[in-house]
Image (spheres, rainbow, N blue to C red):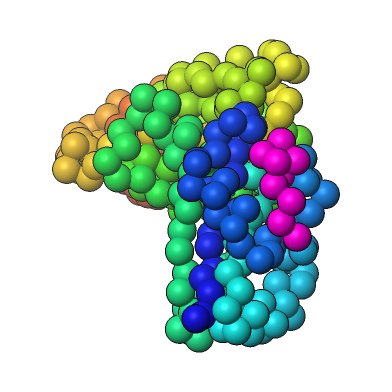
Amino acid sequence: MTGVLYVVATPIGNLDDISLRACAVLKQVSLIAAEDTRHSSRLLQHLGISTPSMALHDHNEQAQAESLLARIVSGDSIALISDAGTPLISDPGYRLVAAAQAAGVRVSPVPGACAAIAALSAAGLPSDRFVFEGFLPAKTTARRGRLESLSGESRTLIFYEAPHRIVECLQDMRDIFGAVRRIALGREMTKTFETIRLLPAAELCAWVESDANQQKGEFVLVVEGAPATDQLPDEAETDALLVKLLKYLPVKPASQLAAELTGRRKNALYDRALALHAGSAGVD
Ligand code: SAM
Protein backbone atom coordinates (compact mmCIF):
# COMPACT_ATOMS: atom_id res chain seq x y z
CA MET A 1 0.00 0.00 0.00
CA THR A 2 1.33 3.42 -0.97
CA GLY A 3 1.39 6.03 1.78
CA VAL A 4 -0.03 9.54 1.80
CA LEU A 5 1.55 12.97 1.94
CA TYR A 6 -0.53 14.91 4.47
CA VAL A 7 -0.27 18.71 4.37
CA VAL A 8 -1.07 19.64 7.95
CA ALA A 9 -1.94 23.12 9.22
CA THR A 10 -0.57 24.04 12.66
CA PRO A 11 -1.46 27.01 14.94
CA ILE A 12 -0.45 30.63 14.17
CA GLY A 13 -0.03 31.51 17.84
CA ASN A 14 -2.42 29.81 20.22
CA LEU A 15 -1.22 26.21 20.47
CA ASP A 16 -4.76 24.93 20.98
CA ASP A 17 -5.71 25.99 17.45
CA ILE A 18 -5.09 22.59 15.93
CA SER A 19 -7.69 20.09 14.78
CA LEU A 20 -8.27 16.65 16.29
CA ARG A 21 -7.55 15.14 12.87
CA ALA A 22 -4.26 17.05 12.61
CA CYS A 23 -3.20 15.59 15.99
CA ALA A 24 -4.23 12.08 14.92
CA VAL A 25 -2.37 12.35 11.60
CA LEU A 26 0.78 13.72 13.24
CA LYS A 27 0.72 10.77 15.68
CA GLN A 28 0.06 8.16 13.04
CA VAL A 29 2.51 9.09 10.24
CA SER A 30 6.01 7.61 10.01
CA LEU A 31 7.71 10.98 9.63
CA ILE A 32 6.97 14.68 10.07
CA ALA A 33 8.73 16.93 7.57
CA ALA A 34 8.94 20.24 9.42
CA GLU A 35 10.21 23.65 8.26
CA ASP A 36 12.22 23.94 11.49
CA THR A 37 12.31 20.88 13.72
CA ARG A 38 13.37 22.84 16.82
CA HIS A 39 10.50 25.28 16.39
CA SER A 40 7.94 22.50 15.84
CA SER A 41 9.18 20.42 18.78
CA ARG A 42 7.42 22.86 21.14
CA LEU A 43 4.07 22.17 19.50
CA LEU A 44 4.69 18.42 19.23
CA GLN A 45 5.65 18.25 22.91
CA HIS A 46 2.56 20.25 23.85
CA LEU A 47 0.45 17.69 21.94
CA GLY A 48 2.34 14.68 23.35
CA ILE A 49 3.48 13.58 19.88
CA SER A 50 6.79 11.76 19.52
CA THR A 51 6.79 10.96 15.78
CA PRO A 52 10.27 11.35 14.26
CA SER A 53 10.80 14.58 12.35
CA MET A 54 13.20 15.95 9.76
CA ALA A 55 13.84 19.46 8.46
CA LEU A 56 12.31 20.40 5.12
CA HIS A 57 12.90 24.03 4.20
CA ASP A 58 13.46 26.18 1.11
CA HIS A 59 17.12 25.18 0.89
CA ASN A 60 16.79 21.37 0.95
CA GLU A 61 13.25 20.80 -0.31
CA GLN A 62 14.18 20.06 -3.92
CA ALA A 63 16.95 17.67 -2.87
CA GLN A 64 14.79 15.87 -0.29
CA ALA A 65 11.63 15.59 -2.38
CA GLU A 66 12.72 12.48 -4.28
CA SER A 67 13.68 10.43 -1.21
CA LEU A 68 10.53 11.48 0.68
CA LEU A 69 8.36 10.43 -2.27
CA ALA A 70 10.23 7.12 -2.48
CA ARG A 71 9.37 6.50 1.18
CA ILE A 72 5.70 7.27 0.52
CA VAL A 73 5.63 4.95 -2.50
CA SER A 74 7.12 2.19 -0.32
CA GLY A 75 4.26 2.57 2.17
CA ASP A 76 5.19 5.27 4.71
CA SER A 77 2.89 8.23 5.23
CA ILE A 78 4.50 11.62 5.82
CA ALA A 79 3.09 14.83 7.30
CA LEU A 80 4.34 18.18 6.05
CA ILE A 81 4.15 21.06 8.53
CA SER A 82 5.57 24.58 8.60
CA ASP A 83 6.49 26.84 11.52
CA ALA A 84 2.97 28.26 11.68
CA GLY A 85 -0.33 27.98 9.85
CA THR A 86 -0.82 26.26 6.53
CA PRO A 87 2.25 24.91 4.68
CA LEU A 88 2.84 26.44 1.19
CA ILE A 89 1.08 29.69 2.16
CA SER A 90 4.18 31.93 2.15
CA ASP A 91 5.93 28.84 3.50
CA PRO A 92 7.90 25.87 2.08
CA GLY A 93 6.19 22.81 0.63
CA TYR A 94 5.28 23.74 -2.93
CA ARG A 95 8.10 21.76 -4.56
CA LEU A 96 7.34 18.62 -2.55
CA VAL A 97 3.59 18.79 -3.20
CA ALA A 98 4.12 19.51 -6.92
CA ALA A 99 6.52 16.55 -7.15
CA ALA A 100 4.03 14.32 -5.32
CA GLN A 101 1.23 15.31 -7.70
CA ALA A 102 3.50 14.71 -10.68
CA ALA A 103 4.41 11.27 -9.32
CA GLY A 104 0.77 10.32 -8.72
CA VAL A 105 1.27 10.20 -4.94
CA ARG A 106 -1.86 10.93 -2.90
CA VAL A 107 -1.73 14.36 -1.23
CA SER A 108 -4.28 15.04 1.49
CA PRO A 109 -4.81 18.42 3.19
CA VAL A 110 -5.49 18.61 6.90
CA PRO A 111 -6.81 22.17 7.08
CA GLY A 112 -6.56 24.59 9.95
CA ALA A 113 -5.13 27.99 10.83
CA CYS A 114 -3.96 30.42 8.16
CA ALA A 115 -3.14 34.01 9.11
CA ALA A 116 -4.52 35.44 5.85
CA ILE A 117 -7.90 33.76 6.30
CA ALA A 118 -8.02 34.53 10.04
CA ALA A 119 -7.45 38.24 9.30
CA LEU A 120 -9.99 38.26 6.47
CA SER A 121 -12.58 36.59 8.69
CA ALA A 122 -12.31 39.37 11.29
CA ALA A 123 -11.48 42.41 9.11
CA GLY A 124 -14.98 43.57 8.27
CA LEU A 125 -14.11 43.98 4.59
CA PRO A 126 -15.78 42.17 1.68
CA SER A 127 -14.76 38.52 1.80
CA ASP A 128 -16.63 37.17 -1.22
CA ARG A 129 -13.70 37.79 -3.57
CA PHE A 130 -10.15 38.43 -2.44
CA VAL A 131 -6.54 38.34 -3.61
CA PHE A 132 -3.70 36.97 -1.47
CA GLU A 133 -0.47 38.84 -2.25
CA GLY A 134 1.76 37.36 0.49
CA PHE A 135 4.82 39.48 1.32
CA LEU A 136 5.49 42.64 -0.67
CA PRO A 137 9.02 43.17 -2.04
CA ALA A 138 11.41 44.40 0.67
CA LYS A 139 12.95 47.22 -1.43
CA THR A 140 11.02 50.48 -1.53
CA THR A 141 10.93 50.94 -5.32
CA ALA A 142 9.79 47.39 -5.98
CA ARG A 143 7.23 47.55 -3.16
CA ARG A 144 5.74 50.79 -4.41
CA GLY A 145 5.70 49.44 -7.96
CA ARG A 146 3.77 46.35 -6.81
CA LEU A 147 1.28 48.52 -4.89
CA GLU A 148 0.84 50.79 -7.95
CA SER A 149 0.07 47.75 -10.08
CA LEU A 150 -2.58 46.68 -7.53
CA SER A 151 -4.16 50.08 -6.97
CA GLY A 152 -7.05 49.42 -9.37
CA GLU A 153 -7.79 45.92 -8.00
CA SER A 154 -11.41 45.82 -6.86
CA ARG A 155 -11.18 42.62 -4.82
CA THR A 156 -10.09 42.74 -1.16
CA LEU A 157 -6.29 42.43 -0.95
CA ILE A 158 -4.40 40.48 1.72
CA PHE A 159 -0.72 41.06 2.53
CA TYR A 160 1.74 39.68 5.06
CA GLU A 161 4.22 42.17 6.51
CA ALA A 162 7.23 42.08 8.82
CA PRO A 163 7.41 44.35 11.91
CA HIS A 164 10.45 46.32 10.71
CA ARG A 165 8.62 47.33 7.52
CA ILE A 166 5.07 47.81 8.81
CA VAL A 167 5.25 51.62 9.07
CA GLU A 168 6.85 52.11 5.64
CA CYS A 169 4.39 49.68 4.12
CA LEU A 170 1.37 51.50 5.58
CA GLN A 171 2.80 54.84 4.43
CA ASP A 172 3.18 53.48 0.89
CA MET A 173 -0.36 52.06 0.97
CA ARG A 174 -1.75 55.39 2.17
CA ASP A 175 0.12 57.27 -0.60
CA ILE A 176 -0.72 54.82 -3.38
CA PHE A 177 -4.18 53.47 -2.49
CA GLY A 178 -5.28 56.85 -1.06
CA ALA A 179 -5.94 58.19 2.43
CA VAL A 180 -9.55 57.04 2.57
CA ARG A 181 -9.08 53.41 1.43
CA ARG A 182 -9.83 51.22 4.47
CA ILE A 183 -7.20 48.84 5.77
CA ALA A 184 -7.56 46.24 8.53
CA LEU A 185 -4.46 45.52 10.59
CA GLY A 186 -4.38 42.00 12.04
CA ARG A 187 -1.54 41.92 14.57
CA GLU A 188 -0.49 39.00 16.77
CA MET A 189 -3.73 37.15 16.06
CA THR A 190 -4.66 34.43 18.58
CA LYS A 191 -1.87 35.66 20.90
CA THR A 192 -1.84 37.84 24.02
CA PHE A 193 -1.53 41.17 22.21
CA GLU A 194 -3.96 40.41 19.42
CA THR A 195 -5.11 43.61 17.67
CA ILE A 196 -7.59 43.82 14.82
CA ARG A 197 -8.28 47.39 13.69
CA LEU A 198 -10.08 48.64 10.57
CA LEU A 199 -9.50 52.30 9.67
CA PRO A 200 -9.01 54.52 6.62
CA ALA A 201 -5.36 54.22 5.46
CA ALA A 202 -4.27 57.67 6.71
CA GLU A 203 -5.76 57.09 10.19
CA LEU A 204 -4.37 53.57 10.53
CA CYS A 205 -0.95 54.75 9.42
CA ALA A 206 -0.94 57.66 11.90
CA TRP A 207 -2.06 55.35 14.71
CA VAL A 208 0.68 52.77 14.06
CA GLU A 209 3.32 55.51 13.58
CA SER A 210 2.41 57.03 16.95
CA ASP A 211 2.49 53.82 19.00
CA ALA A 212 5.68 51.72 19.03
CA ASN A 213 3.75 48.78 20.56
CA GLN A 214 1.64 48.55 17.42
CA GLN A 215 4.81 48.05 15.37
CA LYS A 216 5.75 44.80 17.15
CA GLY A 217 4.86 41.22 16.28
CA GLU A 218 3.36 39.59 13.23
CA PHE A 219 1.05 41.38 10.81
CA VAL A 220 -1.55 40.78 8.17
CA LEU A 221 -2.94 43.76 6.26
CA VAL A 222 -6.35 43.40 4.64
CA VAL A 223 -7.01 46.21 2.19
CA GLU A 224 -10.38 47.28 0.82
CA GLY A 225 -10.55 46.86 -2.96
CA ALA A 226 -10.70 49.85 -5.31
CA PRO A 227 -14.22 50.89 -6.32
CA ALA A 228 -15.34 48.72 -9.27
CA THR A 229 -14.94 50.49 -12.63
CA ASP A 230 -18.70 50.78 -13.10
CA GLN A 231 -18.93 52.65 -9.78
CA LEU A 232 -16.29 55.20 -10.77
CA PRO A 233 -17.27 58.64 -12.02
CA ASP A 234 -17.15 58.77 -15.84
CA GLU A 235 -14.45 60.58 -17.79
CA ALA A 236 -16.42 63.80 -18.23
CA GLU A 237 -17.08 64.02 -14.45
CA THR A 238 -13.44 63.26 -13.70
CA ASP A 239 -12.27 65.91 -16.18
CA ALA A 240 -14.61 68.48 -14.64
CA LEU A 241 -13.16 67.72 -11.19
CA LEU A 242 -9.58 67.93 -12.46
CA VAL A 243 -10.24 71.25 -14.16
CA LYS A 244 -11.59 72.66 -10.88
CA LEU A 245 -8.65 71.33 -8.85
CA LEU A 246 -6.12 72.61 -11.40
CA LYS A 247 -7.39 76.15 -10.81
CA TYR A 248 -5.97 75.98 -7.28
CA LEU A 249 -3.31 73.25 -7.32
CA PRO A 250 -0.32 72.16 -9.45
CA VAL A 251 -0.75 69.05 -11.63
CA LYS A 252 0.67 66.48 -9.16
CA PRO A 253 -1.38 67.30 -6.05
CA ALA A 254 -4.45 67.94 -8.20
CA SER A 255 -4.23 64.48 -9.74
CA GLN A 256 -3.46 62.88 -6.35
CA LEU A 257 -6.50 64.49 -4.78
CA ALA A 258 -8.66 63.54 -7.77
CA ALA A 259 -7.45 59.94 -7.44
CA GLU A 260 -8.47 59.88 -3.79
CA LEU A 261 -11.85 61.44 -4.44
CA THR A 262 -12.74 59.31 -7.46
CA GLY A 263 -10.93 56.02 -6.84
CA ARG A 264 -9.38 56.32 -10.31
CA ARG A 265 -5.70 55.48 -10.86
CA LYS A 266 -3.27 58.23 -9.90
CA ASN A 267 -0.97 57.72 -12.90
CA ALA A 268 -3.80 57.91 -15.41
CA LEU A 269 -5.17 61.04 -13.71
CA TYR A 270 -1.71 62.62 -13.69
CA ASP A 271 -1.44 62.16 -17.48
CA ARG A 272 -4.96 63.52 -17.94
CA ALA A 273 -4.25 66.50 -15.65
CA LEU A 274 -1.09 67.27 -17.64
CA ALA A 275 -3.10 67.25 -20.87
CA LEU A 276 -5.85 69.43 -19.39
CA HIS A 277 -3.26 71.78 -17.92
CA ALA A 278 -1.45 72.07 -21.28
CA GLY A 279 -4.78 72.57 -23.07
CA SER A 280 -5.81 75.36 -20.71
CA ALA A 281 -2.44 77.17 -20.76
CA GLY A 282 -2.88 80.72 -22.02
CA VAL A 283 -6.71 80.50 -21.98
CA ASP A 284 -7.28 83.12 -19.20
N1 SAM B 1 1.87 29.67 6.56
C1 SAM B 1 1.45 30.78 7.38
C2 SAM B 1 -0.06 30.95 7.29
O1 SAM B 1 -0.76 29.99 6.96
O2 SAM B 1 -0.55 32.03 7.57
C3 SAM B 1 2.19 32.05 7.04
C4 SAM B 1 3.67 31.93 7.14
S1 SAM B 1 4.52 33.41 6.78
C5 SAM B 1 6.20 32.88 6.77
C6 SAM B 1 4.50 34.27 8.31
C7 SAM B 1 3.68 35.56 8.22
O3 SAM B 1 2.30 35.27 8.41
C8 SAM B 1 4.02 36.56 9.29
O4 SAM B 1 5.14 37.34 8.93
C9 SAM B 1 2.76 37.39 9.35
O5 SAM B 1 2.72 38.28 8.26
C10 SAM B 1 1.70 36.30 9.14
N2 SAM B 1 1.29 35.76 10.43
C11 SAM B 1 1.55 34.53 10.92
N3 SAM B 1 1.00 34.38 12.14
C12 SAM B 1 0.38 35.54 12.43
C13 SAM B 1 -0.37 36.01 13.55
N4 SAM B 1 -0.55 35.24 14.62
N5 SAM B 1 -0.87 37.26 13.50
C14 SAM B 1 -0.66 38.05 12.44
N6 SAM B 1 0.04 37.65 11.34
C15 SAM B 1 0.55 36.42 11.35
**138 relative to 253 in the view: left or right:** right
Q: Position of residue 245 (x, y in %)?
A: 36, 26
Quarter of image, ligand 1: top right
Q: In front: 261, or 247? A: 261
Q: Can you give x and y, in whole percent of width and height, for residue 147 in the image?
A: 51, 47
Q: Residue furthest right?
A: 38
For the point 30% across and 45% down, the residue is: 129
Query: At 42% from the left edge and 34% from the top edge, which residue is drawn?
Result: 120
Across the whole image, how many numbered discs are drawn on residues?
A: 0
Which of the two residues, 152 or 192, is positioned nearer the viewer here?
A: 192
Near-viewer residue (143 or 20):
20
Residue 244 seen anywhere in this rendered image of the structure: yes
Q: Is residue 277 magenta?
A: no
**Boundaries of the magenta span:** 44-53
14, 214: nearer the viewer: 14
Residue 276 appears anywhere in the view: no
In x, y percent, where is residue 21?
Answer: 48, 47
- Taking 214 as reference, is 219 above or below it? below
Question: Relative to 41, is 18 on the left or the right?
Answer: left
Considering only vertical position in the picture, is 270 above or below 145?
A: above
Q: Looking at the rendering, in which quadrant would you find the C terminus?
A: top left
Vertical relation: 46 (above or below) 27: above
Answer whether residue 49 is magenta in the image: yes
The quarter of the picture where residue 45 lies is top right
**Residue under the image location 76 percent in, 35 percent down:** 164
Name the main secondary structure of what is drawn in magenta.
loop
Residue 192: quarter of image: top right
- Which residue is drawn at the image coordinates 48% and 27% (left, top)? 184
Is 281 on the left-hand or right-hand side of 74? left
Q: Locate residue 203, reporting x and y percent.
A: 52, 17
